[in-house]
Image (tube, rainbow, N blue to C red):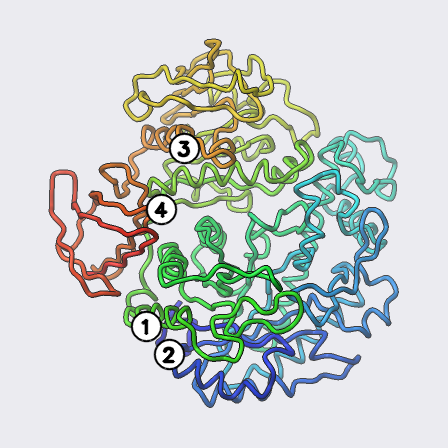
Amino acid sequence: MRHLLSDNYFPFGTQYYRAPSPHSEDWECDLKAIADLGMNTVKYWVQWRWNNPRENEFYFDDIDRLMDLAAENRLKVMLNTIVDVAPAWVYEKYFDVSMVTRDGIAIGPQTQPHRQIGGLGWCLNHIGAVDHMLKFLEVTVERYSNHPALEIWNMGSEPELTSSMAEMRKWSDDASRMGESICYCNNCRKQFKDWLKLRYSSIERLNRVWNRNYSNFSQAEIPSTRNTFNDLIDWRMFFVHTLGENVRHRFEVASSIDQGKHPLMCHHVFIQGFPVVSTASDPWNVGRFGDLHGFTQMDDPMMIDVLRSCARGKPVISAEMLMLPGYTLDLPDTIDADDIKRLIFSGIAGNLKGFIFWQYRPEILGREAPTWGLAHLDGSSTEKLEAYVRVGQVLQANKEFLLEASPAKAKVAIFYNPENQIFAWASTGSEKTATNSIMGIYYALYEKNYVIDFIHPIDFNRDLLKTYQVIIVPFPYVLGETLCRDLEWFVEQGGTLIGEAYFAGWNIDEGHHAKTIPGSGMDKVFGVSQDDAIPVREDNSDIGVVSNLPQINKLSGIKAHLIRESYIVHEAEVLAKYANGKPAVTINRFGQGQAILMGSYIGLEFFTNGTPPNSELVSGLVAMASEISRPIVVNNSRIRIDQLMYDNKVMVIVRNLEDGPIEDTVIFPVELPTELIEQFNQSKVLLTKTANGMTMAVRLKIKEVQVWYG
């Protein structure tokens, strides 16, 4: 990160300006106060609709003054280029610029609580509108690329198809609302067929994969139901492609004009709240662009690990810390110092290199008023603002370490596949079936102090796979032949693969269901094939461990979820059975590695119902199958421990995940200093060397976060 910054500092500050708020009479005193508090970075929005009010006419008086005030106060500026708000003249000029739902409703232009000036709803496949959008970016970058206050260009601010129009993505959780899906305009229809030509090259190939008998690509029908899978997956992945190309063009404009004087950032949304089927948001797709990555951070560490993973070594910052969300008369709970420390230091633990709080003053426009702000409505200080500043002081005191430090390399990875996410929506009516399966697996490992990566089909190469000891594929219905061969190779070379029910069950390469489960030859890797599969009911959901392996032999109360798949065992060993005695969990030695198959959606049950034995099964299988070094909590309290290392120094971040105070002992399997200093209260703790590693006594109040350094 240090090489991207103009000075030696840890980026820490606040969102300040989204026109026309705050009012101009407040700017001078606010920016001076922000600087006096010790913050070093502010974020301003440059908005297409606001700053390009008429064709070929631009208005930058507000941004000019704000940039100059930042320079006077020695504040660094991140400029957010906001292009989802098309000017009114664009809608007048092009009658067909609005996105259109499946049911034929044009949705633009509209306002949202966070886009009070309007303009949302224009289609990224409208070539004329895209050209005007790129012209606006050219003018903006030319105007500010030499301004002394400018530090970072945000050229991709939360890129996703619905432009954060929350109601336009509700259908991803409820397939009965598919009529609200976008976009079915004529531009998208035409360009989808052009994209199919590039993707398949011949109509014969398309016919085979879609199981159709078209004579030419013009006959290809736009999916309007969820009843067939491959055409629907292609239709939604077309918008992933559309979004990626749009973001690529934005970065090309900025790069050609700025010429490397400032880092370019892509600011992502999170997979938990922005389903790919409705928003086309795939962090790995837009993550190809830029020098660093930002994201909208909420109290969910999985967001951090997804972005760190898709960045693949590029720095990641919290470009919007969301801690005070709300609406008029729907106010957020107050936050305190522990809340702020938890969010920031979960980020530090995940290797984030900067934090921008959303926002300094509470909002005064639209339905977000009067929430979101650190300060009072009149700009005066609050306890939460002072707490945020105190955390910033600790970050700056440790900036030399934090800018260079990193966590341990992950040895376990979870697979995320956007095509599988779309399949989950089509097959179950909600993309959350797949997303929550992933989240359940993640949190089962997170609470046992594993460092976790995510991998994506874009990443799949054998050099990357061999860096992991364990790869887990939750809800693994759609994989494909190439991915399965790579996973087979991974196991042959000594890795551990963990899968769930209907592994590679849909043959996406040929557009039909696999005839043997697991599919694509993975039955040989797992050493089993499907016997039967039935729905889970309350009276048939129990899974009992029959293995003597110490990591799992004491578990009881494991529950199946959604379906219950049992197996015909060919070569595998049975680890657990259903109540009727049929195999439920198996392990097979294959090559130098092993493949474990769980015959239901174990992670989904844990996430949905919080079933602790399901979590213990997942973490126990990983512990059994690997030798991954991690901190161990002796009495199994829910404590998250993270370590950052650099230049023989270590930072240990300890967070209480329980609902009450904790006293426990942590064993670190690596060499650490014998004395650490807590960075907020300067207390000291002594570590003791034992045969199992370094031990540390831990006492945590409810919600407490401790940050130790030495």
Q: Which residue is mark 2?
A: 38
Is residue 138 positioned above or below 227 on the image? below
Q: CA distance from mark 4 to mark 1?
A: 25 Å
Marked residue nearer the N-terminal end (2 or 1) = 2
Task: Please state which amino acid type lies under the numbered disc 1.
Answer: Gln
Q: Residues within 10 Å of mark 4 (few under 14, many from 20)?
A: some
Q: Residues within 10 Å of mark 3 (few under 14, many from 20)?
A: many
Is residue 457 positioned above or below 59 on the image? above
Circle 3 SS class:
helix
Q: CA distance from mark 2 to mark 1?
A: 7 Å
Q: CA distance from mark 3 to mark 4?
A: 15 Å
Q: Which residue is mark 4?
A: 657
Residue 393 shows which numbered tag? 1
Q: Toward which corner of the image does residue 587 lie, by quadrant?
A: top left
**Which percent across, then down, holds residue 458?**
55, 46
Task: Please state which amino acid type lies under the numbered disc 3.
Answer: Ser
Circle 2 SS class:
loop
Mark 4 against mark 1, which lies toward the viewer? Answer: 4
